Amino acid sequence: MSFREENSEDGRGGDLRKPFLHTGSWYRMGSAQTSSMLGSSQVIRDSSISVLACVMIVALGPIQFGFTSGYSSPTQTAIVNDLKLTVSEFSLFGSLSNVGAMVGAISSGQIAEYIGRKGSLMIAAIPNIIGWLSISFAKDLSFLYMGRLLEGFGVGIISYTVPVYIAEIAPQNLRGALGSVNQLSVTIGIMLAYLLGLFVNWRVLAVLGTLPCLALIPGLFFIPESPRWLAKMGLTEDFETSLQVLRGFDADISVEVNEIKRAVASTSRKSTIRFADLKQRRYWLPLMIGIGLLVLQQLSGTNGVIFYSSNIFLSAGISSSDAATLGFGAIQVQIKF
């Protein structure tokens, strides 16, 4: 049964009665309003179009992630000269985003569970904006370091929340393709930082770094919350409404509704593992494997190359280091694409 049919049968006139973080949407409307909006709703009748629109909005988050990673490469020489930094001080500046991301990643799961995927992205966007402005107006190391930490904190939340949101809203036949958008957006953000860094100074580039999150915040008001999270929170009416919008007003969502309800019920029956439980011997092997893989990934040096690629190419004797850096960013995008 479609969303329109439900409204016409029971006569419910739903206005925006729920908080932003629960429903967060423009789509709660009565039957009369729905009928008058049928012409303009054509753009979201097809589930692919509706889901793609949501994915494109939240993809601004990983673009911000990539921009943060790529920012230090084209700006290294200028920042070191303007603020009279040593190589060690600038290296610490570049690395602090990872420290902030670690803190953000640790807290991201709880934040996303308590206030929803959209609320989590909102929280991630705010420190990112403050961080970029702090770097743009920095006169000394304290503002520079604080800004980088705040950026990293926001990136840590984004790196968890965006893939989860995409996976939870995507229909089964598109889940794999849409899931790859996250990593592709990260590489696009890196390339944008490299490209814009060729034309503007480091302070202007930091101001431009606020744009993805400044666009993300209003965009969050126009997309539905994750149906699975709403179902987990027991918000049945909002859960079904959100899913109806994502699949189209005329789509029959009854099968998927039942699947999500069964998945949520199954998850709720599983016991939660606490940190204290990790002392049990049965968790040692998977824990060591997981930590080992993370360490190996970091020892690969990928972040170091991304953060300081321009200086690396220059030290290697490549005179056109900026062009080489831009080419490196373009190759990453091509690989992910």
Image: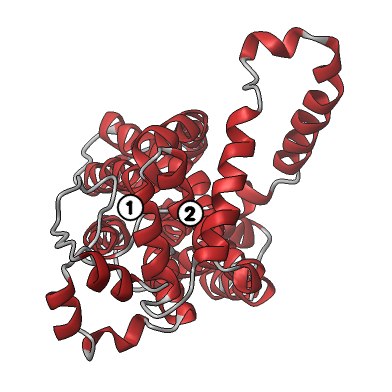
Question: Element under label 1?
Answer: helix
Q: On the picture, is 139 further left or further right than 3? A: left
Q: Is residue 126 above or below residue 329?
A: above
Tell me if 7 is positioned left or right of 71 in this view. Answer: left
Extreme residue in the front direction: 9
Q: Amino acid at mark 2?
A: Tyr
* Residue name at image x 85 percent, y 16 percent: 282
Q: Relative to 113, is 288 above or below?
A: above
Q: Amino acid at mark 1?
A: Asp
What residue did someone put label 2 on?
165
Question: Looking at the image, can residue 322 be seen?
Answer: yes
Badge 1 density bin: few <14, some 14–19, many ≥20, Cα 10 Å: many
- Residue visible at 49% across and 68% down? 253
Image coordinates for residue 137, horizontal then vertical, percent: 19, 45
Q: In this rendering, is residue 315 above or below 50? A: above
**Where does the image place residue 148, in percent across and percent down from the top left?**
37, 39
Mark 1 lies on residue: 238
Q: Nearer the viewer, residue 174 or 67?
A: 174
CA gap, disc 2 and disc 1: 16 Å
Precedes in sequence: disc 2 or disc 1:
2
Residue 40: horizontal and vertical position, in percent?
Answer: 22, 87
- The foreground one among 257 and 84 is 257
